[in-house]
């Protein structure tokens, strides 16, 4: 037997050494998972005795974290908006920054009873699509992705969260397999936007564990916005709203791409850290 506090402090020290941003939180989440404890158990009972078998389960999870695997992938899930999503190496992990798109959509469309047709391009885990659908109970949704494995993940999330009867998932390179008269009321998209030159700056948790097709785009991260600017006008219903995630230094250039593509009323919106994160527009 070994005391919880001793396992905890040793593991925090090891994670500090590899440069984890949040060693205490990481360890607590792994302890909760391995020992089947609540956060309160960990806080209130530091002298709890842990069996060797349970400690082994924890050490196996810790070893993965020490190899820089992200906590969300070790736990297999990540919270986004008010929902919990299954995540894996096959899809981009939902990030709080992307909640900017959901907030913007809710602000633009105050009437929650609308039967919106929502499209999510590059749906990944399905986090944008399903979060917005959760706020509009009469909405229907289409999630598009170029990765069959990501689509399977989105579909599983839709099923777990009880939205499968309201949405479809389509394997497609942007609009290639969509009918051009689809007429969506809301289009969401978090495209790949990291330039190749930024690759060396990425944390190993991102670079080594997340799908590169969801992260990187040609032309210093601008290529997919140019392709989207060509197809979006054919997909929107009258009065539709489009919300696109952007890299925080890309705002001005991406506004230019879409204004040349005929978009109107283009606004740059900021994330909670005050950085440009979303472009909202209409056609
Ligand atoms: N926001 C992600 C990051 O900076 C990038 C996601 C993307 O390219 N869409 O890691």
Image (tube, rainbow, N blue to C red):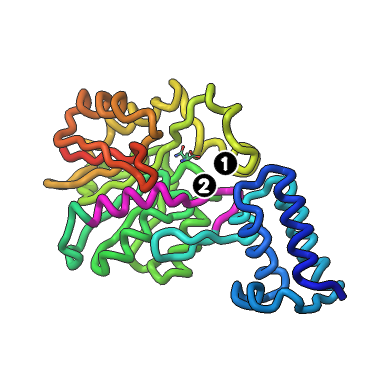
Q: Quadrant of residue 222?
A: top left
Residue farthest to the left, as pictured = 238
**Contact flag, marks 1 and 2 (Cβ < 8 Å):** yes
Q: Position of residue 151 (x, y in %)?
A: 48, 52
Q: Position of residue 212 (x, y in %)?
A: 56, 36
Q: Position of residue 210 (x, y in %)?
A: 58, 43
The disc label shown at residue 211, or none: 1
How far apart marks 1 and 2 lie (CA) works out to: 6 Å
Above or below for 148 versus 110? above
Q: Quadrant of residue 278?
A: top left
Q: Residue at x 42, y 44 (%)?
A: 122
Q: Is 74 left, or right, of 189 in this rendering?
A: right
Q: Which quarter of the rendered picture does the N terminus lie within? A: bottom right
Q: Is mark 2 within 8 Å of ligand 1?
A: yes
Q: Position of residue 14 (x, y in %)?
A: 76, 51
Q: Which residues are magenta?
A: 87-106
Q: Residues within 10 Å of mark 2 (few under 14, many from 20)?
A: many
Residue 151 on the magenta span: no
Q: Residue at x 44, y 32 (%)?
A: 193
Above or below for 208 versus 11? above
The disc label shown at residue 92, or none: 2
């Amino acid at each position: 037997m070994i005391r919880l506090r001793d396992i905890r402090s040793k593991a925090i020290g090891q994670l500090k050494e590899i440069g984890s941003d949040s060693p205490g939180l990481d360890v607590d989440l792994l302890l909760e998972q391995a020992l089947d404890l609540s956060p309160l158990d960990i806080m209130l009972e530091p002298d709890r005795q842990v069996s060797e078998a349970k400690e082994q389960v924890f050490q196996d999870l810790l070893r993965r974290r020490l190899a820089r695997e992200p906590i969300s992938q070790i736990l297999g899930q990540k919270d986004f908006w008010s929902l919990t999503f299954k995540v894996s190496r096959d899809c981009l992990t939902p990030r709080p920054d992307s909640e900017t798109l959901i907030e913007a959509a809710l602000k633009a469309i105050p009437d929650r009873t609308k039967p919106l047709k929502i499209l999510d391009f590059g749906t990944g885990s399905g986090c944008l699509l399903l979060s917005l659908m959760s706020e509009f109970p009469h909405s229907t949704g289409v999630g598009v992705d170029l990765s069959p494995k990501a689509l399977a993940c989105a579909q599983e999330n839709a099923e777990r969260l009880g939205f499968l009867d309201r949405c479809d998932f389509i394997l497609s390179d942007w609009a290639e397999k969509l009918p051009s008269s689809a007429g969506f009321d809301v289009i969401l998209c978090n495209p790949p936007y990291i330039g190749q030159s930024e690759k060396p700056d990425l944390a190993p948790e991102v670079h080594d564990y997340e799908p590169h097709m969801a992260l990187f785009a040609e032309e210093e991260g601008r290529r997919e916005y140019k392709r989207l600017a060509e197809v979006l006008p054919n997909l929107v219903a009258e009065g539709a709203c489009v919300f696109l995630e952007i890299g925080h230094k890309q705002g001005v250039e991406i506004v230019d791409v879409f204004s040349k593509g005929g978009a109107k009323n283009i606004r740059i919106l900021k994330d909670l850290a005050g950085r440009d994160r979303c472009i909202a527009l209409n056609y």
